[in-house]
Amino acid sequence: DAVNHVVINEVCGGSVELSADDAIILPDFIELYNAGYLNCDMKGLYLSDSTDEKRLLQVENITLAPGERLLVELVDTELSVGRGGGETIYLYTESGRCIDSVQLKEMSAGISYGRAEDGSEEWALIRETPGRENKESDMVVNAPVFSNEAGFYDEEFYLTLSCDEGDRIYY
């Protein structure tokens, strides 16, 4: 069934674009992607942030070709995406079967949570790419945290480095 290959590809809790005159607030969005080889009829698909209310937002009734994306802007809907992380977004069929889901991480301005590459299994914080291809070069990695501040010390000490869960430090 072609619908089994539609995935949540990127999620963003809104952002702000600054121009010379003023700030433009952009809406939350969820990007869907057809990772399969067949056209997919999106009729009867729903997005939600709940396992109880599975029909929170009906997806646009279009046919999504292989490799094609559908950008769902969350304007005037009950569904919204926070930047704080921890929230889960679900993609359901009309019968209530979950096709895909993602638990969000904390996002800062200009950053979304998306698949490292379109349709891949790996998720990462990325520069927002609404309606465009996700690439590994869009990934954002937070700097490691050092247990001591930089400087000169008279006595030896143990230095530890830490990073976000799932990240690696190479030394």
Image (cartoon, grey):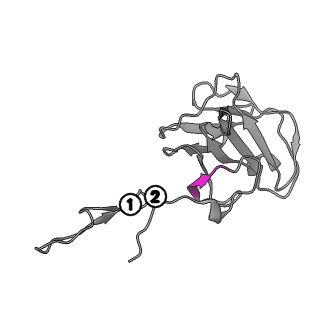
Tell me what residue is drawn at x 43 percent, y 67 percent.
168
State which quadrant residue 23 falls in: top right
Q: Gap in Å between the C-alphas at discs 2 and 1? A: 7 Å
| Residue 31: in magenta span | no
Q: Is residue 39 above or below residue 24?
A: below
Numbered range of the magenta stretch: 123-128
Q: Which residue is mark 2?
A: 142
Q: Point out residue 80 in the picture as x, y percentages from the top left corner.
A: 61, 29
In this view, the residue in front, 29 or 57, is 29
State which quadrant residue 24 falls in: top right
Name the magenta segment's main secondary structure: strand
Badge 2: few (under 14), some or many (20 or more) residues near its Cα, within 10 Å? few
Q: Point out residue 110 in the picture as x, y percentages from the top left corner.
A: 60, 46
Say which amino acid is labelled 2.
Asn
Choose mark 2 or mark 1, whichever is in front.
Answer: 2
Say which amino acid is labelled 1.
Cys
In the rendered view of the protein, which quadrant contains the C terminus? bottom left
Tell me what residue is drawn at x 11 percent, y 74 percent.
154
Tell me what residue is drawn at x 45 percent, y 63 percent.
167
| Left or right: where 92 falls relative to 141 | right
Tell me what residue is drawn at x 38 percent, y 60 percent.
163
Closer to the N terminus: mark 2 or mark 1? 2
Q: Would you say the residues marked 2 and 1 are in contact, meaning their CB atoms lie under 8 Å apart? A: yes
- Residue 149 in view (yes/no): yes
- Residue 1 in view (yes/no): no
Q: Point out residue 46 in the picture as x, y percentages from the top left corner.
A: 72, 32
Q: Which residue is mark 1?
A: 163
In this view, the residue in front, 41 or 167, is 167
| Left or right: where 69 falls relative to 138 | right
- Could you tell me which secondary element the residue under label 1 belongs to? loop
